[in-house]
Image: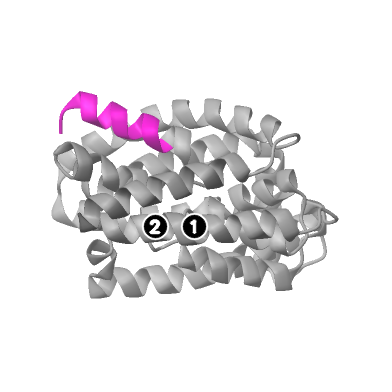
Amino acid sequence: MPLFQLILLAVIQGLTEFLPVSSSGHLILLPGLTGMQDQGLAIDVAVHVGTLLAVILFFWADVRLALAGTLRLARGKVDTPGAFLALCLAIATVPVVICGLILHLTGWDEALRSIAVIGWAMIVFGVFLYWADQKGPQVRKAEGWTMRHALIMGLWQAVALIPGTSRSGITITAARQLGYARHDAAKLAMLMSIPTILASGVLLGADVASQANWALARDAGIAAVFAFAAALLALGVMMRLLRSVSFTPYVIYRIALGVVLLWIAYA
């Protein structure tokens, strides 16, 4: 794949992963609207892995806490904040792993990569985000995350397997509806992305390795590096802005883009 396209994909992923506008939808739209070669799911996952590394670095204190807690959780102990955080992250990840595996084995993951699907998802879930952000109280903090809320957010996260939904957008929607403050809702959404992207990376990475497609692996590595750099910059900016800005601008963008995409799809 041309280096320019790899860099363009990485930058798009890095700038949109943490915004509730669907990074996956934008990655699918690039070849669909420009005529470029479709990069495929392997490159999509590679740039997601790049953004994953940015999340880990940005939230390293929480990640380190969860890693230490995972060791205690593996011994059947949930007696520390880290172990409880690890347990909640595991609960939130189960639904998307199960649904993602089903879609992958049935081939529906490729079938859903269409402009019409993305357009409808942009509009519908954009409206949901606006409703939750306007109606949801801001009384809960990320430190007060519960297992019940982790499961609810995990079930909503599985819906993000539909391109155009936005994984961060749908989990933020669920968190805002549950009463988490905007900044804390975004933080939980970012932490939930870590095991989710790891799971999808392992799944597709195994496919690439089994095919011995080293050219694809090289392209994926390049894309991941550039996505990491773009994502780290975008993440810092967004988390600062969320302390004073609502999600309405992102909703307007989603609906406007959705209308354009539906016009293209059905015209």
Find the residue positioned furthest to the right: 139
Residue 130: which numbered mark, if any?
none
Residues packed near mark 2 inside 10 Å, few (<14), some (14 to 19) or many (20 plus): many
Left or right relative to 133: residue 121: left
Residue 196: which numbered mark, if any?
1
Q: Tell me the distance, in whole angstroms, between the alpha carbons under discs 1 and 2.
A: 6 Å
The image quadrant that residue 177 belongs to is: bottom right
- On screen, 20 above or below 238? below
Identity of the residue drawn at 23% across and 62% down: 110
- Say if mark 1 contacts mark 2, CB within 8 Å: yes
Q: Which residue is mark 2?
A: 200
- On screen, 239 above or below 27? above
- In the rendered structure, which amino acid carries the disc numbered 2? Ser
Q: Position of residue 67 (x, y in %)?
A: 65, 51
- What range is drawn magenta here? 1-13
Identity of the residue drawn at 24% across and 50% down: 264
- In the rendered structure, which amino acid carries the disc numbered 1? Thr
Residues packed near mark 1 inside 10 Å, few (<14), some (14 to 19) or many (20 plus): many
Q: Position of residue 123 (x, y in %)?
A: 45, 56
